[in-house]
Image: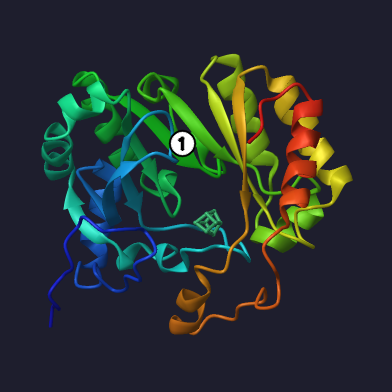
Amino acid sequence: MQTEQPPLEATSPFELRVNLGAHVPESDVRTALASGDMGFLHSFTTGSTVDGPGVRVVAWTAGCMWRCRYCHNPDTWTMSNGIPVAVTKAVEELRKYRQGLKVMAGGLTVSGGEPLMQHRFVEKLFAAAHGMGIHTALDTNGYLGDRLTDAALEHVSMVLLDLKTFDAERHRSLTGMDNAPTHSFARRLAARRVPIWVRYVLVPGLTDDPEDVAKTAAFAGELGNVERVDVLPFHQMGQYKWKKLGLEYTLENTPSPSNELVEQTCALFRSAGLKAY
Ligand code: SF4
């Protein structure tokens, strides 16, 4: 039996959402992914000032193939936890904010989960947003960047690129995945002059090794299209989700980084010629 769904608009992405698309038959999910006519969204929030320039509408997609040990939204890992939304409905919703977004120099950000798990939906949404003159930002781990054609990239105004750690082995142990595809997507964006804002989650004991941070900073600095780096201090706000979902959480005793550590990390990015906050 289908349970009543919460509204698509959420007060924050920290709301736990599960099984909202579980009633959608597998064949319909496959068709939706192939056509991009329907997407699976965890939620939709408005008024964000931390997900790209200006004030933004953010569509949080469901589905991610990474398993970052510090992920604060593990309920977005599974696509069937998302609410099925027709792209036409998402565009209609976005249209309501068109004037406001322009006045506030903002735009649409698609985040997740990992948006490129549903790249055709994202492409359609971004093309429609651009058609309305709305700035678009893609918040991604970059692993599936190859899925976007050059034509699709024309509708991506900028990318918020999550860089997790530089050393390949450490990256695999932190996320379960390889970071080479992320680096190759970053280079492709650089070649096409698509602006990047790097997001770097700073976790004491996991991503704070100065040598490793310096390598990430050097890589980002050499790209030439990184406009800023946001060093995001690890926090425990997602811990309750891991517990509720019955997942093994390994960072129970990991503190948030001190202001001093955040500043030291920012300084490493600045040494590579980048603006870091
Ligand atoms: S890439 Fe993002 S959504 Fe996916 S597991 Fe990592 S932190 Fe979570």
Q: Nearer the viewer, residue 2 or 13?
A: 13
Residue sitting at x 28%, y 58%: 11
Left or right of 136 in this view: 176: right
* Residue 180 vertical placement versus 99 (above, below): below
Residue 102: where, in percent of width, then height?
A: 24, 22
Quadrant location of the C terminus? Answer: top right
Residue sitting at x 32%, y 28%: 106
Residue 240: where, in percent of width, then height?
A: 48, 78
Give the quadrant of residue 9: bottom left
Left or right of 134 in this view: 157: right
Quadrant location of the N terminus? Answer: bottom left
Q: Nearer the viewer, residue 197 or 140?
A: 197
SS at mark 1 in the image: helix
* Residue type beneath disc 1: Arg
Dot 1 alpha-carbon crowd within 10 angstroms: few under 14, some 14 to 19, many 20 or more: some
* Residue matched to label 1: 147
